[in-house]
Image (cartoon, rainbow, N blue to C red):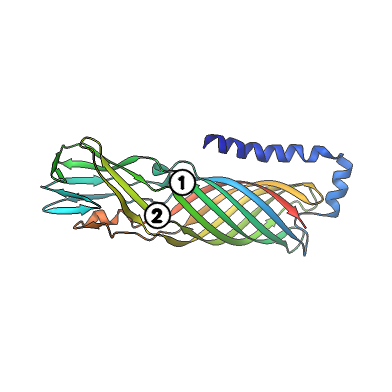
Amino acid sequence: MRNQQNNLIAFAFIAAIWIPGQTSAADLENAIAMRDVPTKGKFSVARVLGTDFDVGGNWAESATETVAGAINIGSSTYADGIAFTAPSQDFADVYNQPSSIGANVSYGLTSTAEVFGGVHYTSASSNEFDAINIDTAGTINGTAVAVNTVVTGKLDNYSEYGIDGGYRQFFRPGKQFRPYVSGSVGLKQVDEININLLHKATAIRADDIRFYDSSLTYTLALGLGFRFDAGPNIAVGMETGLKYAGDLDEGDGDISGVRSFTDTNNSGDKLDVPIMARIDIVF
């Protein structure tokens, strides 16, 4: 995953340095003067690669549960006065760094403004994490468990498909290097996410417990980036900003007899700082 991020950064800088070097400065200036990106009334397409860094939102809420009788979590039964705490988890606590690939189509309103729409796919592999801390001894599936032991969790890998649309405003018209700001709204579809639980001290496990159902939610984003016109029909750039995604749909069908523990998956919202590299082709 680290190699993917390094390749992504290298891609942006190599594109920005190598492409302009293929023509003379005078030829490049003449070409760019003939065809800015954006150009009023013209379309451009972009290939986008990137990642994002989690800075807010709750992927799993905290909860505390004391069992008077018995409760069922997936295929496991927690009983005999057991009490436990589920600590809160951010997206970055339970998933590795995500990667994203996508494509945009933009339409020039003027030489400094464009509207755009795009599609993307984002994925991330999961990490094992401490899902439940045992606070008071009891039993799981009839087997005694000790105080201060942990039930670990591992979620399904993350898979997201999204669409968005918005507006970009450029500055420094007529220049090769032009910063811009953008705003967009969108929708994303997140695949169903189950969780596997394991009490390592006793090897008791419960697999494929529903955590989040397949969910459709909204996204809001503000962007800040730059575009470097590298030729008459091509530009390269990078973008960052803030992106917020709304809550996911909880899946509580495999949990029964609990109180606050059912609220651990009543969230799934995310606040990210995306880092995207792009190549735009004008036609």
Residue name at image x 57 percent, y 54 percent: 120
Image-based side of 80 in relation to 33, left or right: left
Category of crowding for the residue at label 1, using alpha-carbon neighbours closer than 10 angstroms: few (below 14), some (14–19), many (at least 20) = some
> Residue 227: x percent and y percent?
71, 48
Marked residue nearer the N-terminal end (1 or 2): 1
Category of crowding for the residue at label 2, using alpha-carbon neighbours closer than 10 angstroms: few (below 14), some (14–19), many (at least 20) = many
Numbered-mark total: 2
Check the picture and name the quadrant holding the C terminus: bottom right
> Label for residue 28?
none
Task: Confirm or deny contact between disc 1 and disc 2 (CB under 8 A).
Answer: no
Image-based side of 176 in relation to 104, left or right: right
Residue name at image x 27 percent, y 41 percent: 198
Residue name at image x 25 percent, y 36 percent: 200
> Residue 236: x percent and y percent?
71, 46
| Location of residue 24 with respect to 190 vertically, above or below | above
Helix, strand or loop at mark 2: loop
Helix, strand or loop at mark 1: strand
Tag 2: residue type?
Gly
Tag 1: residue type?
Val
Along the line of sight, the residue nearer the viewer: 166 or 175: 166
Image-based side of 134 in relation to 189, left or right: left
For marks 1 and 2, give the CA distance.
Answer: 13 Å
> Residue 168: x percent and y percent?
66, 58
> Residue 125: x percent and y percent?
45, 43
> Label for residue 55?
1
| Location of residue 193 with respect to 117 vertically, above or below | above
Q: Mark 2 points at which residue?
A: 268
Image-based side of 281 in relation to 192, left or right: right
Which callout, 1 or 2, points to the residue nearer the camera? 2
Q: Image quadrant of residue 118?
A: bottom right
